[in-house]
Amino acid sequence: MNWSELYDNSQEPTEKQINEFVESSLWEDLDTYLQQTYNIKPTLFYSNCSMDKGYWKGWNIKYKKSGKALCTLYPKQGYILLLLPIGIRQMGEAELLMPTCTEYTQNLFKESPVGRTGKSLAFEISDGDVLFDIKRLIDIRVNTK
């Protein structure tokens, strides 16, 4: 079942409904990590984006720190899709981190184009090692001055 078909823009899903749809302890791990480590609360947003046949459409969960978007999560059945921007100021540190990351993360970083503001990495999180990479990349975003 498609997430955007289950919950349209008139029906905001609950935390329980998100957890039941995703069915992944990695989702709960990431949510707990972001809330406890950075003292932030997730915010639900509805996106009407129809790019990629609705891949980005539907309710998503944004995490912001000091007005800056750290990441956005898109619930998928059995996993989560995480959009993680890496800004130009963070690129150097992220590049230094890459040799210690999983092959998946290295390939994603290498294949993602650089725009004028940096890169946007779209992670399909179904592995704890990839989640560890993501946590370290988020830490770079938070601690870049």
Image (cartoon, rainbow, N blue to C red):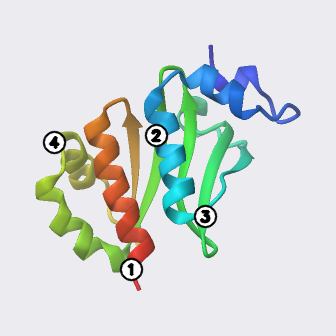
Q: Which mark is residue 29?
A: 2
What distance separates the C-alpha of mark 4 from that of mark 2?
Answer: 21 Å
Which element is circle 2 on?
helix
Sequence order check, earlier mark of 2 and 1:
2
Secondary element at image label 1: loop
Circle 3: residue type? Lys
**Residue sitting nearer the eye, 41 or 64:** 41
Residue at the bottom extreme, as displayed: 145
Q: Earlier in the sequence, mark 4 or mark 2?
A: 2
* Residue wearing tag 3: 64
Residue that protrudes farthest toward the left in the picture: 99
Crowd around label 3: few <14 · some 14–19 · many ≥20 (10 Å): some
Q: Residues within 10 Å of mark 2 (few under 14, many from 20)?
A: few
In-front residue for pair 37/133 = 37
Measured in 3D between alpha carbons, the distance from the residue under mark 2 to the one under mark 1, in whole angstroms, is 24 Å
Q: Position of residue 125 (x, y in %)?
A: 39, 35
- Name the quarter where the N terminus is drawn: top right
Q: Nearer the viewer, mark 3 or mark 4?
A: 3
Tell me the distance, in whole angstroms, between the alpha carbons under discs 4 and 1: 24 Å
Across and down, in percent, residue 128 comes to: 31, 36
Observer-side mark, 4 or 2, equals 2
* Residue ID at (23%, 75%): 92
Q: Quarter holding the C terminus?
A: bottom left
The type of residue carrying mark 1 is Thr
Q: Which callout, 4 or 1, points at the residue further toward the start of the chain?
A: 4
Does residue 15 lie above or below 84 as drawn? above
Determine which residue is flagged by label 4. Answer: 103
Q: Which residue has dot 1 on it?
A: 144
